[in-house]
Image (tube, coloured by chain):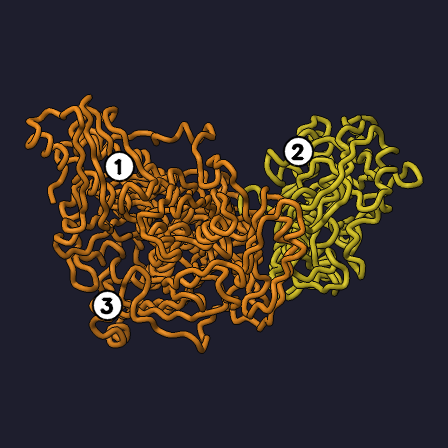
């Protein structure tokens, strides 16, 4: 791997290429494409969480003008068994979660399809659901592997001995609620079949994966399936793989022999789009009298569905942030009558850092240490498995942040600063996220008029992916950006990895760099430096390059600082300002990087203060399934937020030297807010969100 | 959505006559009704669009007469309202969003339905939506529901901020009923759920609100509205207080106090007012008075926080109003 040395375009702040299309409404999302003859589907969701369908009465729906079909498990085309039972839609009478799709009505208009769906009667044998996560659930078990391929349990040294020998200890249990992504574009798909080929416009972060999934489910050769995702209205992980809507649309289109559009209404996105599992995390910290960590114990509990196992890797963050000689980390999970949880912005690190970084703050208070210095004093150059970090500038982030934020002026006593009716407080937390690179392919083509077409099946979910990829391509080609046309969002381009795991820019960018370099070489070697009239094209695959890298722990790091005000009479918490300082390798585009991090931090504040999906354990239903009840932060909640980068050069990542930034910003954010609330009030909030209902009863009256 | 008919009558009596047809409902701003139609909570067979009727404008005399179709935005920014009844303006601006306030009308604001999750979900038991089916909220998600004046049948709250403000100025609501024009005090307009939670108000069926009259109310010139909610904007209240206070020589001469988000109706805190009048204008006295009112509270499993919330909010707001 050779780093890109000459970088004219990389590092330049540039607006997003598609910004104008988006704000003027020209950008087309999954169901915006005008497809002649398209009809519309509306799902019939289960009104119970556990049971077996005995009958689906479709006559009334079929009698409506414009209703073309009612598809359910008795008449649906068979799908090939796959590895995700949640995608085997309309195949079985068993219902495993509230809101699972029982039938699909297809009609000439969306209104008629919806009316038809309401006319369908479902009869079922229903059992009471087991839907509530609790720490003493008898069904809890310890999976060997948790999400993202981590070992569920990792111990080193002797935790119990280290903990017992510690002068200062913290033992606390933290809870995070069910949270939803609520991306602006709901899960939506347009599907049509033509001569045995399946074309799909899908709201997905991973059209290459969706293509493979659809091919497998419908028993097709992959080249017979094409998935388009030119624009995606946010995903945050919820569109990281094929979802039920994708398969339903394809199934319906096959049944009615016409193109079908299916956009889930917001209420159904809550059950069908995935969510972040609630977590219960016990953290035990032990330190010597100087604040040196001797032991960390992080034991996490989360839920999964009866259909699939998803084990959120909350304790993994405790293998990275600090390096105590004694460590125990474990995960337990229980399968409930709930929809399948999934990736949500920084799965694992996000809720895990709320627990760990809150506990570190508790340790600082218990030991009388400054929380910034405590973290600096426990820095490490290796992770818990002994791997050296490829680069790590957490200390620099903490120092730079403390300086910019004015941390030195802080009075460490809680509830010491007032501004009228408000108590003021500040908090800090560390952040990290893995710097992952995944194999991808890209194609570069030169035309005789010295223009270049670079194609990579990236998904631009609002991040600015196509913008930064064009910057990378221009530097790899050594040409002006204006000479490069970038194409993304089409599985026909060739395999590329998901816009997830913060791996997009690194993975796609490497493939783009490789393709562009190969193209240059070929033009020079085979064509004497002149592009022939028919043009030159090359395709690159980074699989071998990535496999050849040395073994390192690769992570981005950061420090979150925030100031809050709390009205102790009402329990209202308001953010005053927030600063994130991040070391994320070489920053390809400061504008889009800053937006990513501000977005993550905002979502973290939202998680800290607002977001929770309430599940009614009697029915197993999410009862706050709309944007009036599921509160996400609005502009008024985020008055002042800023991002700074610590310069970082890392030769062990990829040719751009970049680390992913999409998830880093949310990590630690909720802990920073909760720590600030403690500083303001003296009240330690170990559950989220910190609403008046939670905080007011805890504030000393 | 189900098919429905649509009429646009030319005058008030015509509108009331049209309402006699089965399944008819009035449509003004539509910011709540259309949502409820989409959710299947309500399925009118006929929408009677009243936006063309002549109930616009704000007329100022001894009191103020506000047309039923005045938009929330227009009312909130009216100079007379802001000067003489600031609580009304503050209450409106504490609710919804700019777009909704532009669209929503005064009468529609007063008649909006509860945001109880179970009322809005037709698959759940709700005595308000479907009498006799039960109440899933009582033992369900109810952290924002009623602590005062509820019944075994219903623990819903009235979501209107405006109604709380109107309560302390003793507004009256004018309407065209089946028997002609009539008026009802805002205190009589709303009701406790009792065993008829399906009825939000005491308006005779088919009545058309034509306007709201705010009587001359000097104490209201210093009135305030304070609302607590989870997020800083665009959320319904966890609790709110409308208050006006007249203190003379350190003694409470007169006071008006009403609470929002605690009951099926805007909760005029009569007992607290009685306790406050002629007592010392001190925080301790304010707290005792609020507690006297809150002695009636019967919180559910997850909404007992509203008791200290309302007490503290009341004390804070009265302190701010104390000269």
Callout 2: few (<14), some (14-19), or many (20+) C-alpha neighbours within 10 Å? some
For the N terminus of chain A, the image quarter is top left
- What chain does mark 3 sit on? A
Dot 3 corresponds to which residue?
A294
Which residue is more in the foreground, A652 or A699?
Answer: A652
Label 2 sits on a secondary structure element that is helix
The tint chain A carries is orange
Residue that lies at the very extreme toward the bottom in this rendered image: A138
In the picture, the disc for residue A518 is none
* Label 1 sits on residue: A455
Residue most extreme to the top: A449
Residue A591 picture quarter = top left
Q: Which chain is yellow?
A: B
State the image coordinates of residue A221 (x, y, percent, origin top left).
32, 52
Residue at image mark 2 = B103
Task: Using the image, determine if residue A580 lies above or below residue A356.
Answer: above
Of residues A477 and B253, which is closer to you in this image?
A477
Question: Can the viewer see residue B116?
Answer: no
Q: Are marks 2 and 1 on the same chain?
A: no
Q: Position of residue B118 (x, y in %)?
A: 65, 57
**What residue is rendered at 63% in x and 36% in y?**
B100
Residue at 20% over, 35% down: A444
Figure quadrant of residue A72 = bottom right
Q: Is residue A548 above or below residue B139?
A: above
- Work out how far the residue at label 3 is from the one at label 1, CA to CA, in angstroms: 50 Å
Residue A68 image point, x, y percent: 58, 48
Q: Give x and y (percent) for residue A275.
A: 45, 56
Mark 1 surroundings within 10 Å by alpha-carbon count, few (fewer than 14), some (14 through 19), many (20 or more)? many
């Amino acid at each position: 791997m050779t780093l890109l040395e000459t970088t004219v375009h990389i590092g330049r702040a540039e607006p997003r290429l598609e910004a104008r299309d988006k704000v003027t409404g020209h950008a087309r999302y999954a169901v915006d494409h005008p497809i002649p003859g398209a009809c519309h589907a509306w799902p019939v969701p289960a009104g119970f969480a556990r049971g077996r369908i005995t009958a689906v009465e479709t006559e009334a729906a079929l009698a409506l003008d414009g209703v073309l079909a009612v598809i359910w498990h008795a008449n649906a085309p068979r799908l090939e068994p796959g590895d995700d039972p949640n995608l085997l839609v309309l195949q079985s009478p068993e219902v495993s979660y509230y809101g699972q799709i029982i039938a699909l009505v297809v009609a000439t208009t969306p209104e008629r399809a919806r009316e038809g769906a309401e006319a369908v009667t479902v009869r079922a044998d229903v059992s009471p659901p087991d839907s509530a996560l609790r720490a003493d659930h008898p069904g809890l078990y310890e999976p060997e592997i948790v999400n993202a391929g981590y070992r569920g349990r990792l111990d080193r040294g002797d935790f119990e001995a280290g903990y017992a020998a510690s002068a200062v200890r913290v033992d606390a249990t933290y809870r995070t609620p069910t949270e939803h992504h609520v991306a602006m574009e709901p899960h939506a798909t347009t599907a049509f079949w033509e001569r045995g080929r399946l074309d799909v416009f899908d709201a997905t972060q991973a059209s290459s994966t969706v293509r493979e999934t659809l091919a497998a489910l419908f028993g097709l050769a992959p080249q017979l399936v094409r998935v388009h995702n030119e624009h995606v209205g946010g995903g945050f992980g919820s569109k990281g793989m094929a979802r039920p809507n994708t398969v339903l649309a394809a199934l319906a289109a096959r049944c009615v022999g016409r193109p079908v559009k299916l956009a889930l209404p917001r209420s159904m996105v809550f059950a069908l789009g995935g969510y972040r599992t609630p977590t219960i995390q016990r953290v035990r910290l032990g330190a010597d009298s100087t604040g040196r960590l001797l032991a960390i114990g992080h034991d996490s509990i989360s839920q999964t569905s009866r259909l699939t196992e998803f084990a959120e890797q909350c304790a993994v963050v405790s293998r990275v942030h600090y390096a105590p000689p004694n460590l125990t980390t474990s995960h337990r999970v229980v399968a409930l009558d709930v929809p399948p949880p999934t990736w949500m912005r920084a799965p694992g690190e996000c809720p895990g850092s709320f627990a760990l970084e809150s506990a570190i703050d508790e340790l600082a208070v218990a030991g009388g240490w400054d929380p910034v210095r405590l973290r600096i004093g426990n820095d490490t150059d290796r992770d818990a498995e002994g791997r050296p970090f490829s680069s790590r500038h957490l200390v620099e982030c903490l120092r730079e942040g403390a300086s910019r934020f004015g941390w030195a002026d802080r009075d460490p006593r809680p509830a010491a600063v007032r501004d009228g009716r408000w108590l003021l407080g500040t908090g800090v937390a560390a952040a990290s996220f893995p710097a992952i690179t995944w194999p991808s392919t890209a194609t570069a083509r030169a035309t005789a008029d010295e223009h270049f077409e670079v194609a990579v099946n990236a998904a631009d979910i609002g991040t600015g992916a196509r913008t930064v990829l064009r910057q990378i391509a221009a530097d790899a080609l050594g040409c002006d950006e204006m000479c490069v046309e970038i194409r993304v969002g089409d599985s026909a381009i060739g395999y590329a990895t998901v816009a997830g795991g913060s791996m997009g820019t690194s993975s796609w960018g490497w493939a783009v760099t490789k393709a562009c370099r190969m193209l240059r070489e070929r033009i020079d070697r085979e064509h004497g430096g002149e592009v022939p009239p028919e043009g030159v094209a090359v395709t690159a695959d980074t699989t071998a390059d990535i496999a050849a890298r040395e073994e390192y722990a690769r992570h981005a790091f950061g420090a979150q600082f925030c100031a809050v005000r709390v009205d102790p009479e009402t329990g209202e918490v308001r953010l005053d300002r927030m600063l994130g300082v991040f070391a994320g390798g070489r920053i390809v585009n400061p504008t889009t990087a800053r937006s990513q991090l501000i977005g993550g931090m905002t979502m973290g504040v939202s998680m800290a203060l607002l977001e929770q999906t309430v599940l009614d354990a009697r029915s197993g239903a999410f009862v706050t399934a709309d944007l009036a009840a599921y509160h996400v932060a609005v502009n008024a909640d985020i008055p002042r937020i800023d991002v700074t980068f610590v310069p970082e050069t890392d030769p062990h990542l990829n040719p751009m030297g970049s680390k992913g930034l999409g998830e880093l910003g949310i990590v630690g954010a909720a802990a920073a807010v909760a720590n600030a609330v403690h500083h303001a009030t003296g009240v330690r909030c170990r559950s989220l969100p910190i609403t008046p209902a939670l905080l007011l009863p805890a504030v000393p009256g | 959505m189900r098919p429905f008919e649509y009429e646009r009558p030319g005058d008030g009596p015509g509108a009331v006559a049209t309402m006699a047809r089965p399944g008819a409902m009035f449509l003004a701003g539509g910011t709540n009704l259309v949502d409820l139609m989409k959710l299947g909570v309500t399925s009118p067979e006929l929408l009677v669009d009243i936006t063309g009727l002549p109930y616009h404008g704000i007329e100022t005399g001894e009191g103020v007469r506000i047309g039923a179709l005045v938009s929330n935005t227009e009312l909130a920014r009216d100079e007379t309202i802001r000067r003489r009844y600031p609580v009304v303006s503050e209450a409106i601006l504490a609710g919804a969003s700019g777009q909704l306030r532009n669209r929503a009308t005064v009468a529609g604001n007063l008649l909006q339905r509860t945001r109880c999750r179970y009322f809005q979900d037709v698959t759940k038991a709700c005595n308000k939506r479907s009498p006799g089916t039960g109440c899933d909220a009582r033992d369900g998600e109810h952290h924002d529901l009623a602590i005062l004046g509820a019944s075994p049948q219903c623990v819903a709250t009235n979501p209107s901020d405006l109604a709380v403000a109107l309560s302390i100025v003793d507004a009256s609501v004018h309407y065209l009923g089946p028997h002609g024009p009539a008026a009802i005090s805002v205190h009589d307009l709303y009701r406790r759920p009792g065993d008829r939670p399906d009825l939000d108000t005491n308006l005779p069926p088919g009545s058309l609100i034509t306007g709201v009259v705010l009587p001359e109310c000097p104490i209201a010139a210093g009135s305030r509205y304070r609302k607590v909610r989870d997020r800083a904007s665009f959320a319904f209240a966890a609790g709110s207080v409308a208050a006006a206070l007249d203190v003379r020589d350190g003694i409470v001469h007169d006071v008006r106090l009403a609470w929002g988000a605690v009951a099926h109706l805007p909760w005029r805190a009569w007992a607290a007012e009685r306790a406050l009048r002629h007592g010392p204008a001190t925080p301790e006295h304010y707290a005792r008075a609020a507690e006297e009112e809150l002695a009636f509270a019967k919180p559910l499993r997850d909404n007992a926080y509203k008791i200290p919330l309302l007490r503290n909010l009341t004390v804070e707001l009265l302190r701010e109003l104390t000269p």
